[in-house]
């Protein structure tokens, strides 16, 4: 080894010991003939002092070294003078008196500072990702990711789970997002698909009798990207046989509580995790991924206001819509510009407008106030809990529009008013999702989760009678407004599975062609089973206090699914295309 210790592992107990270190020059300065180098490696920082009297050759090397040079240093650990102790460093009590030093590799001046966490354009960071990853914040994030995965593996191994790999090259099946397709050279005109998740394969492992499976697996989805979504991502994939819903929820809740308390004990973690039905989540928060760190719940005002003389409210009552509101504490003095911003936010979610009532010391203000009676205003205040100084926001529209508009307003007020503790992790289970959702564009029913989810009614006739009333045995784990995991109890009866395929509009021959291997497997005695798949990237993002999963992935893509460092995706040669029996359409090039 070129080193005996990590830089950050040394302390006062090592005083007098001879050590050999290797790492990068974090910073260098000269003072009174001495050269001071802060040496950095994965373990942290340590100060190296080079004197021309003690080691002239080492001092000459130190004088030549610059930022990001790779150095090897041999020397003795000594105490720093009392007035030079750095309490912010684990190594702040000591320094290394250099006796020998050599440059293992020089370095160009980097395009941004490595030694400080200054703001850098993200495109530049991704272009030089290997340099960005040297920075302390990124090192902490990637190390935390390793610790999370290591903890999960140990936790599940201790609970009798088997880690089993499944293939990346599989069959294209409809599971929600677009597949990434891989053309086959050996089978002209045919394609593999990269897995959106190992959904079918883990169910087949249950049929195979392994009973408890998990995998830290890479998944791929060709969909539009955002801050918490990448084209390739990592999830904990988990499946269990002979279980019911609560068995899976209890296992995952126990895992996450233990993980957070072990790896990030500074986080505030309310337990046990509350459980909401899908309907309750929408009613109270307007979203099925509610941020539970603050209140500001939605309040239904329909019954009280649907007969109001205010035409907007009365029309909603006549058309079966909803009237709901929320109260923003201390916001009664919002300016016209701020109120216009809130109105535009609501309209951006499909609402026709936004009613605002400012409860001030000299009365209730707002364009709609003059159309409402004193009794109606008093009822609104009582129902939403508004007092002097508060602002009430009301949306009257179709139920789904009311929900999304008020949810967006709720999140906006969260950020405007700093209502959450950033060190809190507020987990919540959302249960009892609809089984089906209507696809207006294609005029058919889609599976709200995926077609292998077990519906509560288990006959085709019940599903056909009222598809929207059918609930699934599906569940999501949400944290701070992010969906962190999704799972369900699965179908294990081939007759029920065929009923679902019929409900989704698959002719029997097409269902057989796409899923025949699953149907056949179920016919050989599939056990009742279920599973869940927490996202590793989002989990680490929340633990690290980041706002984007790119900050916890070593080599992520941009929002345009591009790798700026390697310049991918990139064209391939005509020869490669011919080998794959492909030809690019001229109008696509």
Image: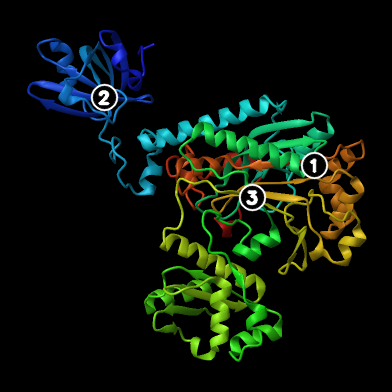
Q: Nearer the viewer, mark 1 or mark 3?
A: 3
The CA span between labels 1 and 3 is 18 Å
Earlier along the polypeptide chain: callout 1 or callout 3? Answer: 1
- Within 10 Å of the Cα at label 2, are there few (<14), some (14-19), or many (20+) other Cα atoms? many
Residue at the disc numbered 3: 274
Contact check, label 2 and label 1, Cβ < 8 Å? no
Q: Is the N terminus in the top left, top right, bottom left or bottom right quadrant?
A: top left
Q: Which mark is residue 262?
A: none
For discs 3 and 2, the disc positioned in front in the rendered view: 3
Rounded to the nearest angstrom, the CA distance separating label 3 from label 2 is 44 Å
| Badge 3: residue crowd in 10 Å (few <14, some 14–19, many ≥20) | few
Q: Nearer the viewer, residue 29 or 359?
A: 359
**Vertical relation: 4 (above or below) 373:** above
Q: How many marks?
A: 3
Q: Residue at x 43, y 44 (%)?
A: 564
Residue occupying the point 9% across, 11% down: 53
Name the residue beneath numbered marker 1. 244
> Image quadrant of residue 103?
top left
Name the quadrant of the C terminus: bottom right
**Mark closest to the chain's N terminus, 3 or 2:** 2
Q: Which residue is mark 2?
A: 92
């Amino acid at each position: 080894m070129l080193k005996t210790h990590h830089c950050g592992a040394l302390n006062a107990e090592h005083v007098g010991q001879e050590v050999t270190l290797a790492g990068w020059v974090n910073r260098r300065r000269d003072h009174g003939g001495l050269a001071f180098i802060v040496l950095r490696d994965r373990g942290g920082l340590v100060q190296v002092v080079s004197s021309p009297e003690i080691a002239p050759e080492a001092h000459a090397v130190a004088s030549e070294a610059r930022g990001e040079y790779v150095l090897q240093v041999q020397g003795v650990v000594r105490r720093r003078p009392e007035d030079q102790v750095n309490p912010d460093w684990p190594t702040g009590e000591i320094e290394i008196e250099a006796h020998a030093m050599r440059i293992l590799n020089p370095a160009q001046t980097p395009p941004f500072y490595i030694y400080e966490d200054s703001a850098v354009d993200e495109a530049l960071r991704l272009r030089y990702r290997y340099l960005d990853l040297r920075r302390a914040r990124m090192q902490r994030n990637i190390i935390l990711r390793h610790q999370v995965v290591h903890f999960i593996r140990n936790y599940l191994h201790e609970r009798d789970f088997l880690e089993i790999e499944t293939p990346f090259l599989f069959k294209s099946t409809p599971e929600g997002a677009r597949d990434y397709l891989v053309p086959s050279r050996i089978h002209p005109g045919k394609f593999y698909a990269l897995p959106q998740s190992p959904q079918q394969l883990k169910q087949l492992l249950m049929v195979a009798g392994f009973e408890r499976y998990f995998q830290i697996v890479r998944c791929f989805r060709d969909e539009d990207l955002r801050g918490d979504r990448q084209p390739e991502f990592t999830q904990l994939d988990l499946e269990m046989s002979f279980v019911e819903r609560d068995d899976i929820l209890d296992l995952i809740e126990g895992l996450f509580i233990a993980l957070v308390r072990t790896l990030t004990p500074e986080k505030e973690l309310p337990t046990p995790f509350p459980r909401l039905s899908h309907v309750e989540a929408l009613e109270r928060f307007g979203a099925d991924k509610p941020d539970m760190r603050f209140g500001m719940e939605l309040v239904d005002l329909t019954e009280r206001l649907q007969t109001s003389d205010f035409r907007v409210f009365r029309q909603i009552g006549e058309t079966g819509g909803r009237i709901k509101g929320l109260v923003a504490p201390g916001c009664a003095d919002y300016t016209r510009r701020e109120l216009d911003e809130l109105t535009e936010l609501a309209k951006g979610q499909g609402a026709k407008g936004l009613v605002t009532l400012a409860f001030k010391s000299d009365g209730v203000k707002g364009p709609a106030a003059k159309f409402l009676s004193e009794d109606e205003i008093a009822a609104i205040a009582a129902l939403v809990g508004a007092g002097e100084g508060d602002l009430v926001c009301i949306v009257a529209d179709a139920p789904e529009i009311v929900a999304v508009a008020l949810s967006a307003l709720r999140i906006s007020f969260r950020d405007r008013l700093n209502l959450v503790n950033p060190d809190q992790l507020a987990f919540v289970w959302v249960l009892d999702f609809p089984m089906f959702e209507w696809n207006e564009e294609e005029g058919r029913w889609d599976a709200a989760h995926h077609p292998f989810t077990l519906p509560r009614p288990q006959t085709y006739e019940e599903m056909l009678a009222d598809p929207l009333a059918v609930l699934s045995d599906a569940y999501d784990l949400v944290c701070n407004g992010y969906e962190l995991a999704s799972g369900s109890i699965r179908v294990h009866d081939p007759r029920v599975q065929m009923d679902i395929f019929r409900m989704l509009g698959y002719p029997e021959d097409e269902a057989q062609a796409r899923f025949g291997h699953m149907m056949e497997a179920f016919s050989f005695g599939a056990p009742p089973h279920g599973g869940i798949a927490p996202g590793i990237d989002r989990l680490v993002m929340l633990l690290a206090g980041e706002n984007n999963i790119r900050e916890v992935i070593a080599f992520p893509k941009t929002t345009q699914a591009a790798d700026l460092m390697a310049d991918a995706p990139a064209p391939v040669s005509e020869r490669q295309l011919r080998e794959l029996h492909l030809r690019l359409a001229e109008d696509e090039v």
